[in-house]
Amino acid sequence: MNESLLSTLVQQALTAIETGQSVDAESVALGLSTLFDRPATPEEVEAAITQLRLIPTFLSMEERLELVLSTLANSSPERPFLQEQHQSVDALFQAARDGQPLSLTVRHDFGVLSHHHEACLIAAIRNQQLTRAQALSCIQDGVRLTQLLSEVNRVALPLEFRTTDHNGMPQVTHSRANLHFDETVTIETPGHAFSIAIGNESELRQVAIPEPDTLSWLDTTLRPDSVLYDVGANIGYYSLYAAALRPGSRVIAFEPAPLNVSRLNHNIHLNHQGGAIMAFPIALSDQTGVVRFGNSYLVSGGWSHRGIDDRKASSEDTFYTGCIAYTLDEFLQSTPFLPFPTHLKIDVDGPELKVLRGALKTLSDRRLRHLLIEMREDPEVIEAETLLTELGFQRIGPHFSGLGNRLFVREA
């Protein structure tokens, strides 16, 4: 199959998904069979279609097509397409056989929100009511898994296996009445472990698939006397990781999404880290004042909100809450009781450049040495890198990670 034909087949599938039509399974099977050099199974076809459905909708068709084609181009006999999905299914069945708890990654892939979900899933496997082929066909598709297990679920109250798309957005609405589970999981670090509560699929995603380059950045640069300003802290995974990794370090966490702030403070209190981490329910920007924060969905652990980014279009589902915005420079001036940052992490899903523009005095201070910023807009990246270079920072590592993270350091 030539690249042109493959591109056409992928675009047809993406268009069908975008317009709510059925994907031509025969075309997907043809493409997979060529990649595998063997006939693709129906379950592999379904798994591939699920992966296509998970591609973030905020990307243009051209960007989605490029993402799929680059993934397929990187497939090889040693690392074939759907390898990770096959490995997750293997891990699921291995855990069921050995009586071991499921890993967070497997829990994320199958929407296992609680020990009740885990018990139901394991029982179905042991009773041969869920095959490997069926599990592969519904990986990262909690709706499909729920349907498959509906006949074998003997729990008195109904369970829903809930997963997210690649953008972290819940695949089903939370407007329906459903059970709420709130469980605590343990996260290991090279230092100490910490606990974090999960109650939905968005929070499960936060703890199950953290960004490896962010963890590596903290592992290699954070010291016991470091001070991390975590801008866009969400439910606190990286703030808690930093405090557990290097006892003695301090973290100032900023998070304006109201449900995330609640869970963030809950997790800080859960770990008795009130002396190391302080959370502020504010947004950092290029101006100080009262603004609106657009919540794209009211789910704890959610991200990619419209927020204070006016470039993002609002929808009829956008829920606005009041929000205080500060420039980082004015925030520090107003809070002399806080330590000055040595590390700055900025991940606010859009207005990162606004945060930098409001922090020129802070960025000029040589006590701030390490910076991680997530940016995907090319024109803004150029401006941000130029600004940081002029202030004495040097970019390190790859120019662009798959997550958009860019690392900078300033020598002492």
Image (cartoon, grey):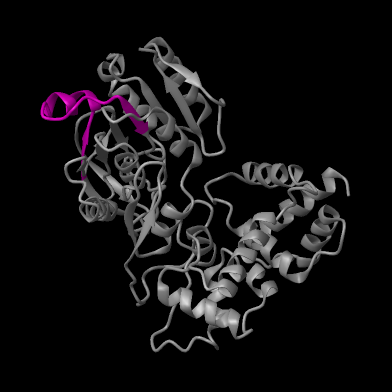
Q: Position of residue 376 (x, y in %)?
A: 50, 33
Q: What is the quadrant of the C terminus in the image?
A: top left
- Relative horizontal placement of residue 382, taking residue 41 as reference (left or right): left
Compare residues 5 and 207 and report the one nearer the observer: 207
Residue depicted at x 25% and y 16%: 361
* Residue 160 visible in this rendered orientation of the protein: no
In the image, residue 76 lies in the stretch drawn in magenta: no
* Residue 8 visible in this rendered orientation of the protein: yes
What is the quadrant of residue 200 in the picture? bottom left
Query: Relative to 259, is 360 above or below?
Result: above
Q: Where is residue 242 in the image (x, y as percent from the top left)?
A: 33, 39
Compare residues 320 and 211 and report the one nearer the observer: 211
Compare residues 32 and 136 and report the one nearer the observer: 136
Compare residues 149 and 144 and report the one nearer the observer: 149
- Relative horizontal placement of residue 345, taking residue 147 as reference (left or right): left
- The magenta-colored residue range is 323-345
